[in-house]
Amino acid sequence: MKPNAPPAEYAFAYKNKPTSGNKINGLGVAEKFRPVPPFHNSGRGAGREEIPWAALDTFFIMSGPWTVFWENIRGLWERRNAAGPVTRDPIEVTDPQAMANQVKAKAREIGIQIIGITLYDDDSQYRENAFPYKYAIMVGTVMRRDAMVTAPHTPAAKEVMRGYRVGSEHANQLAAYIRTLGWQAEGYGIGEDLVQHPMAIQSGIGTLGKHGSLINREHGSNFRISSVLTDLPLVLDQPLDFGAEDFCVSCKKCVTECPPGAIFDTKQMVRGDKKWYVDFDKCIYYFSDHMGCSICIEVCPWSEPGHGPRLSEKMLKRRAANASAGVAMR
């Protein structure tokens, strides 16, 4: 376990424990179905009273230091800018690739460091939600490494909330720009009603890691996700295979450093797909009692600045060598 990390001991518990978060998430279920939110929810979709673990979410939000709480409030306040009026006459888009380049250039002007474009689909929305858009622009906000190394303590928790807040601001600014072009667009950021990981993977900004968070080639897991949903015609980016999957198979760093032992070392069947998965019922109490934890993000070797590209090159070379020798990666 990470030095100075508090043990998985709690002075609180549910009198009547909610339905297992693993059951809600579909752990061990071979049938595909759209998920339901077990913990966080913004209220734009399903009502908060329908969220089984909402009381613990409230405890998590209200029990942290003021500096962390304030960043969370600032992020929630940013939701007022998520949507807005659309210019009456939309510009004609004859070249979706050129438009994608234009949107990405605007994103860089705003300060967005990570961006990818994919389709918005049913797998990316919770069961009771529906959003009338075709495209999803996925945005990554890089967090400050000097703060994240303090996880699971206050500076890291504040930085995570800052990352969500800035991500919301960036997504809303990009959505506002698209609306000036005459096309509907809406920003989605902190604690929203989207299942953002599948879209982020399809957009090429990252791949799912053993610790349940995305890994970006350059920044590891040291970033937060937000998105813009729109009907503006755009050319799609593609998923990017940069070797993180091979790395996670053999690496056990997040598994051994997780205080409640919540990270599975092998992929699990979840809603019809074999994927990396974190045991909700083990993770959520520690997460809530220690300001969102983030230990697994911090200890991931890919999150160390400058390591990602070198690890990617190493893993892809090893894969190519093994393929030439007829050896499967394990």
Image (cartoon, rainbow, N blue to C red):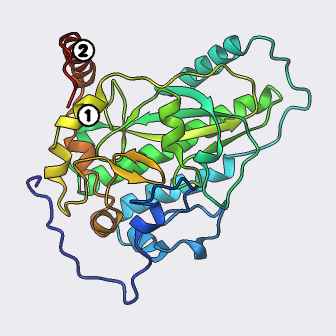
Q: Position of residue 94 (x, y in %)?
A: 81, 12
The image's mark for residue 192 is none
The amino acid on which the numbered mark 2 sits, given as a three-letter code, is Ala
Residue nearer the viewer, 266 or 20:
266
Residue in view at x 59 percent, y 61 percent: 42
The amino acid on which the numbered mark 1 sits, given as a three-letter code, is Ser
Image quarter hosting the N terminus: bottom left
All told, the count of numbered labels is: 2
Residue in view at x 52 percent, y 27 percent: 115
Q: Which residue is mark 1?
A: 303
Q: Is residue 180 left or right of residue 298?
A: right
Q: Which residue is mark 2?
A: 323
Residue nearer the viewer, 194 or 28:
28
Tell me if mark 1 has few (under 14), some (14-19) or many (20+) residues whose alpha carbon lies within 10 angstroms of its own: many
Image quarter hosting the C terminus: top left
Q: Is residue 61 visible?
A: no
